[in-house]
Image (spheres, rainbow, N blue to C red):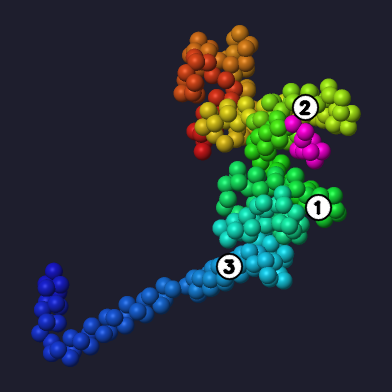
Amino acid sequence: MIKQILIPTLLACLPLGQAICRAQIGSAEAQSADEVTAKPEDSVSNELDKIEAEYRELICMRAADASSELQTRAIELALRHRYVDARFDAVIRKAMQDVSQADNWDVQRVAKATKLLPLCTLSVKERTELAFGCYLASGNSRADRELQRDLRRYLASAPDETSRLVHEQMLAGNPPASIFELVTIAGQSTDATLPLLMKIAKSDDAGSAEKAMLLIPNVIENLKSHTQKRIAANELQKLGVTELEEKYVSFAERIVARYDRNKDGKLDSGEYGTMLMSPASADLDHDGEITIHEYAAMLQKQRN
């Protein structure tokens, strides 16, 4: 305690030059300590981050530049690294808008814009509408057919919006032949499109009727699968999980089977009331019963 009091007092009594010298020594010691704690790998990491950012900027800039000889290669690299960039929005709009007029159709430019669709920041609705318009506008050349294949692949990734556009096109009457290849993309509007397809199948237009007759079974199967996936997604949303891990489902199945006296595949309050630890919190919809998936979701959330 005496030392702590004396040292500051002595320092205060020192001549000004000596006090400054001691301050400088203290500053130098602090700087030396900082240099010791700074790790070489930190410097390397910062440099790598800088180069990576410069590389990303270079690729996005060239992918968005229609005048660049390296645009195609840059687009491939942007896709490989999944570089999403707002600059692609203008490229896509310029290439894909108003393509119904022959003077505005440039298959090579549209093909590049199509590849950029997953990397732009446009809404799904706008992207799908642009792709759908280009799909209908494309012709029968080899390049156009390759473009149609890429557009169809993209449209399949947005089933709800695509099914809406297909339904509107079918509802307008006299749909183009190419539209039939999109009917099998099952989405929210496909169930409304199916009766229109049946109407075409019953028509006197042999060509269109034949296509419809061949497509209807596939549309029904795809619609069934789509409905099942939507029901499962809705159930997961209610359970508060993005997916159920198989190990928890298997465990829940064994527990439910053990206490399920009436063998209905779920537990009511009388059945789970005999359990050592009550799973009542798993009853998310408060219907007095716990399903296997509800029990599995409870276990998964407890463990995670």
Q: Mark 1 belongs to which amino acid? A: Asp
Q: Which residues are magenta?
A: 173-182
Residue 155 lies left or right of residue 298; in this view the side is right
Give above or below for 166 relative to 85: above
Could you say which disc has been placed on residue 57 in the image? Answer: 3
Q: CA distance from mark 1 to mark 2?
A: 26 Å
For label 1, the SS is: helix
Q: Residue at x 77, y 33 (%)?
A: 174
Give yes or no for residue 171 being in the magenta stretch.
Answer: no
Label 1, on which residue? 144
Q: Nearer the viewer, mark 3 or mark 2?
A: 2
Q: Mark 2 belongs to which amino acid? A: Leu
Residue 10 lies left or right of residue 236; in this view the side is left
Mark 3 surroundings: few (<14), some (14-19) or many (≥20) residues within 10 A = some
Q: Residue at x 81, y 50 (%)?
A: 139
The answer to whether the residue labelled 1 contacts the one labelled 3, judged by CB atoms less than 8 Å apart, is no
184 or 18, which lies in front? Answer: 184
Q: Give percent across and percent down for residue 233.
A: 60, 31
Q: Residue at x 14, y 77 (%)?
A: 8
Q: Nearer the viewer, mark 1 or mark 3?
A: 1
Q: Main secondary structure of the magenta part?
A: helix
Mark 2 surroundings: few (<14), some (14-19) or many (≥20) residues within 10 A = many
Q: Give percent across and percent down for residue 31.
A: 35, 79
65 or 261, which lies in front? Answer: 65
Q: CA distance from mark 1 to mark 3?
A: 31 Å
Q: Give percent across and percent down for residue 280.
A: 47, 20
Q: Mark 3 belongs to which amino acid? A: Glu
Could you say which disc has been placed on residue 38 in the image? Answer: none
Q: Locate the N terminus and report the quarter of the image it occupies.
A: bottom left
Label 2, on which residue? 197
The answer to whether the residue labelled 3 contacts the one labelled 2, judged by CB atoms less than 8 Å apart, is no
